[in-house]
Image: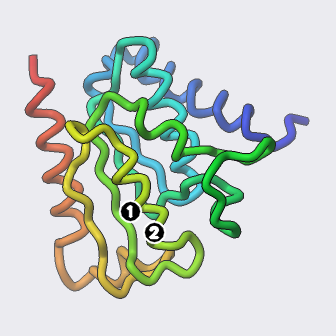
Amino acid sequence: AILPSEPNVYNDVEAAFDHLNLKLGIRPDQIVLYGRSLGSGPTCYLAQKLSRQGTPCAGVILQSPLLSAYRVAFNFRFTLPGDLFPNIDRIGKIDSPVFIIHGTRDEVVPFWHGQELFLGCKRRFRARPFWVAGAGHNNIESLLRQTTAFHDHIRFFIDQCCDKNKT
């Protein structure tokens, strides 16, 4: 049996990307990556890897992202050995537009994680973030269900990414 681990999660996201890219023929600049909470780790990993290879994806959406696993519990200024999903170390190496969604009352991953990741993005790739007033970690969509705001913000970001990459 394959045990859950950070490298295995990265292998999984690479396999999903390879399926889209190699099997279905979808170019990286036609793909918008989306990671929520812990899923922000493999998303940032893949976005950084694609950027390093010179084939950045069309965009990155991070919902309730974490700086790193240890930083959810402790306010460290640097990445310690063994820390998982060090998004803060990757975000500045991503050469794709990054859109961050975070609830201002997140009780699981503190709101300032989203703010710090936004500031860590290369300035030219910072999309205007969507800070959801009063939302926690698991209720952004339900808090906004009476409106189209959640989907409108995502659609606007994707439209910007796709318009930029039309061929």
Q: Does the CB distance between marks 1 and 2 fall below 8 Å? A: yes
Amino acid type, callout 2:
Trp
Q: Is residue 126 left or right of residue 62?
A: left
How did the renderer colour the structure?
rainbow
Q: Residue furthest front?
A: 77
Q: In this view, does 76 lie to the left or right of 97?
A: right
Q: In this view, does 146 lie above or below 27?
A: below
Quarter containing the C terminus: top left
Residue position for label 2? 112
Residue position for label 1? 115
Residue shown at 44% from the left, 17% from the top? 52
**As rendered, which of 55 and 120 lies closer to the eye?**
120
> Residue 94 appears in which quarter of the rendering?
top left
Residue shown at 45% from the left, 72% from the top? 111
SS for dot 1: helix
Give coordinates of residue 129: x percent, y percent.
26, 60
Give coordinates of residue 99: x percent, y percent.
29, 51
Quarter containing the N terminus: top right
Residue shown at 50% from the left, 76% from the top? 138
> Residue 63 appears in which quarter of the rendering?
bottom left
